[in-house]
Image (cartoon, rainbow, N blue to C red):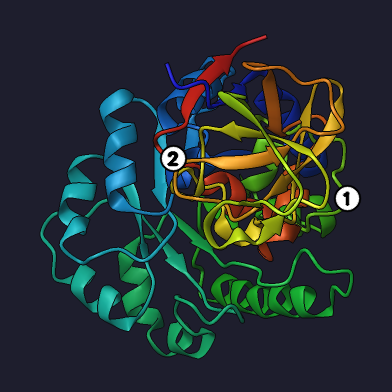
Amino acid sequence: MRPTRARIHLYRLKKNMEIMKQRSGERTFLAVIKADAYGHGALKCLDYLYEQGVRHFGVATFSEALELRSAYEDIYIMVLGATDPSDYEEGARKNIRLPIFDLPSLEHYLTLEEKGPIHIKIDTGMHRVGLQPQEFIEHIEKIKSLNAEGIYTHIARADEEDTSSAYGQIARFNELLDFCDKQGLKFTFIHYANSATILNLELGRTNMVRGGIALYGLAPDGKENFGLEPVMSLYSAILSIRDIPPGEGVSYGHTFVASRPSRVGTLPLGYADGYKRQMSRKVRVYVAGTYAPQIGNITMDQIMIDLTDTKAKLYDEVELMGEHIPAEELARAAETINYEIVTTMGRRVDREYIYE
């Protein structure tokens, strides 16, 4: 078997969730398991969180929601992102919460015979999807006829030290809630808190929070971790070792040329597995109790590491992300964020689930 595998420490989900729950008080906790639970395996994470008593789950797409519904009939499922109008009636039949996210989706929903529970998305500054506050006000009579279960927005800059933009969005959202109060319009759920908001900002009038990246132990800003523990680690093994003399190059393009007699180890993973090519020559691994640099270009299926200054042997296990190499280190090398490192971990990487 290919020795490249991601170890998913499921028990850490509970600790990370508890950290967010401590910050959010008695608010309903909605576990976001979109994008295959940020690369961790949606159904496995769903099963574990269900055992911990979680019943509210969020996803990005309707197909993700259907996958969850096929596993459990009694859970609360919400699609957070824009959805095709044709999904509304099946969503009603499957008891899946869908969003009203612009005027066309509002008008379409009002024409339906089968209407399910919906949440109204408000654009307070993300400018991705959502009704503009003025659109909401101008169409208030139609809004009232929806009997919407929830209202929500999304904070664009909650992970920044300067919180003025985030609190500006919250203020706009609160103004709309005040308008709803005057109109006698009530909602079961009011929410805007993603992971960064839960960890950094006041939660105000919300009664639901949406735990995403922090649930998987990664800090939204890639810096302060708030006591979170990463759920995913990545390992492989050395499947080949060769000695090369000075002047010899390694991998495509020979971007690494040995300046001394060198031991080169080959590991079976590459950019097709999510170990990104743009990290070439910028990352390291942990093997035999020490660090070893990755050398040459990362290829589709294999990478090479310099074992010259290590005691590593053939078939030794190698840590590529974990206790010694955080996801943030890989993210910096790839000029991206920790979210992308875990969510793009490929299907060829077997997941090994650890429960305690």
Residue under numbered circle 2:
36
Q: Quadrant of the N terminus?
A: top left
Q: Position of residue 92 (x, y in %)?
A: 22, 48
Residue 178 sits above or below residue 245 on the image:
below
Residue at the image position 69 percent from the left and 51 percent from the top: 195
Query: Who comes first in sequence, dot 1 or dot 2?
Result: 2
At mark 2, the secondary structure is helix
Task: From the viewer's perspective, tell me whether residue 16 is left or right of residue 37.
Answer: right
Q: Observer-nearest residue: 334 or 289?
A: 289
Residue 34 sits above or below residue 76 on the image:
below
Q: Position of residue 80 (x, y in %)?
A: 44, 57
Residue at the image position 65 percent from the left and 17 percent from the top: 314
**Three-letter amino acid code of the residue under disc 1:** Glu
Residue under numbered circle 1:
224
Distance between the Cα atoms at labels 1 and 2? 25 Å
At mark 1, the secondary structure is loop
Task: From the viewer's perspective, tell me whether residue 272 is left or right of residue 239.
Answer: left
Residue at the image position 47 percent from the left and 57 percent from the top: 150
Q: Residues within 10 Å of mark 1 (few under 14, many from 20)?
A: few
Q: Observer-nearest residue: 222 or 6?
A: 6
**Three-letter amino acid code of the residue under disc 2:** Asp
Q: Residues within 10 Å of mark 2 (few under 14, many from 20)?
A: some
Q: Observer-nearest residue: 327 or 127?
A: 327
Residue 4 appears anywhere in the view: yes
Q: As drawn, which residue projects farthest toward the left?
A: 113
Q: Quadrant of the C terminus?
A: top right
Residue at the image position 50 percent from the left and 90 percent from the top: 134
Q: Position of residue 311 (x, y in %)?
A: 83, 20
